[in-house]
Amino acid sequence: MKSFYFSTRLLIFLSFFAALLLNIIPLSPLVALFYPLWLPLILIYWVIVLPEHIHLSLAWILGLLIDVLHGNYLGEHALALSVLAFLSYRFHLQFRMFPLTQQILFVLMLLIIYQGLFFWMQVFLGFAINFHCMWFSLLASLMMWPLLKSVLRAPL
Amino acid sequence: MRLVFFIILSVLLIVLDYHHYLPSFRHLLNNAVTPLQYAVDTPLYMIGKISQFLETRERLQADNAKLRSQQIFLQTKLQRFDALQRENRQLNQLLAASEHLKKQRLELARVLLVNAEPLLNEVILDKGQFNAVYVGQAVIDADGVMGQVISVNMLTSRVLLLTDFRSAIPVQDVRSDARGILVGRGRLAKLLLRDIPSTVDVKVNDLLVTSGLGGHYPPGYPVGIVSAVDSNGSAQFASIQVEPSAQLSKNRPVLLIWPDKAATTAFKKKS
């Protein structure tokens, strides 16, 4: 039991670490358009699968790290990611029952809320936003969801 | 419950950071995050270096010959530079004008192979506080001005490129001495030259250099080439698009400029 717990913790840590790294890989402008939102996806997955182990504070800190990495004002991603984690937690029981297509729809909704919050904050703080970017990256993220599920489930 | 706490905390942070009340906290986080950035940069950099090792001998010899001939041309161009500098100084003294070609210190830096910002309008350099980089410092590459430093960490610093919406650089037309402000409009659009009335003489293919007004960018460095001028008579200001000279998307070495001592002490007093 103890080794199981440790390996899960390691997997969680590694997946979040990988998500942060994936966020700062250099991209050409074309790829940047279609880039999936790794950190929100991975966070949704872990909150659904292990809701008791993923605290809201972890989501908040991860959001803060993304803010620092991307040069945003501190707290933008932190806020959006906390809301995302909260909503995932709130519906995690129902989510486990969903078939794949419904899961994807639900993830889409969560990501729209996440991106919407973030873009709203950006506009409020005076940055211009290109909304077309949002749909492409959402689409890419949705396509990544089944892949992500199988990758993260495999070592367990 | 807890979510409300985190929301309030986040909003508080945003407000504080927006008004720049959190420099030390931000500084701490930036330094903490540097290993992550190097974790992404180092393998990519190594891959680039290794592919350099695998160059064929013929290719290296050809590159060598090309560089040597390029160097001869550049050195010849430079021979006149000292004489021109002296002449410029004398002319300025005659006109009792201030001297522009002051001594400057240049240092090479490398752009980290890291995505510094989702919209690709910022880059991170591998020089920081240890190398006396300061906020507001001008950054250039071999072809022109790239941008200015907006934050400095211990080992790295963040540069705002010309193409960012927040970037504004005072420029001067080399041919007609027209002055204006060049603002960025995002990575995929050309730069926009503002505050130029329709009557002022700016034509396509004009070279724009830094005018030095405002003190941030030292004068005389190329910034861009005018690519389109749209001055239908009815508008009061011409709409001028400019293509940046610097190669912003290529991974090349960049230079940091330290202007003469007087300017650096002026910066220190201001900040």
Image (cartoon, helix red, strand yellow):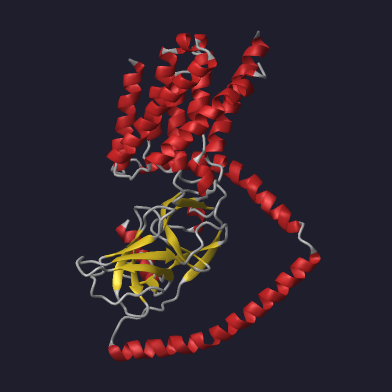
Q: Is residue B144 visible?
A: yes
Give left or right: position of B52 versus A29. Answer: right
Which one is in front, B227 or B257?
B227
Up-down: is B205 above or below A130?
below
Image point (29%, 44%), residue name: A126
Give left or right: position of B66 versus A39. Answer: right
Which one is in front, B96 or B78?
B78
Q: Where is residue B137 in the image (x, y as percent from the top left)?
A: 41, 61
Look at the image and tell me in which quarter the C terminus of chain B lies.
bottom left
Q: Where is residue B77 in the image (x, y as percent from the top left)?
A: 55, 84
Q: Where is residue B201 in the image (x, y as percent from the top left)?
A: 29, 77
Look at the image and tell me in which quarter the N terminus of chain B lies.
top left
Image point (41%, 23%), residue name: A109
Q: Determine the image quadrant of residue B89.
A: bottom left
Q: Position of residue B246 (x, y in %)?
A: 48, 64
Image point (48%, 52%), residue name: B123
Q: How many marks?
A: 0
Q: Determine the image quadrant of residue B199.
A: bottom left
Q: Is residue A75 visible?
A: no
Give left or right: position of A109 versus B44. Answer: left
Up-down: is B107 above or below A6?
below
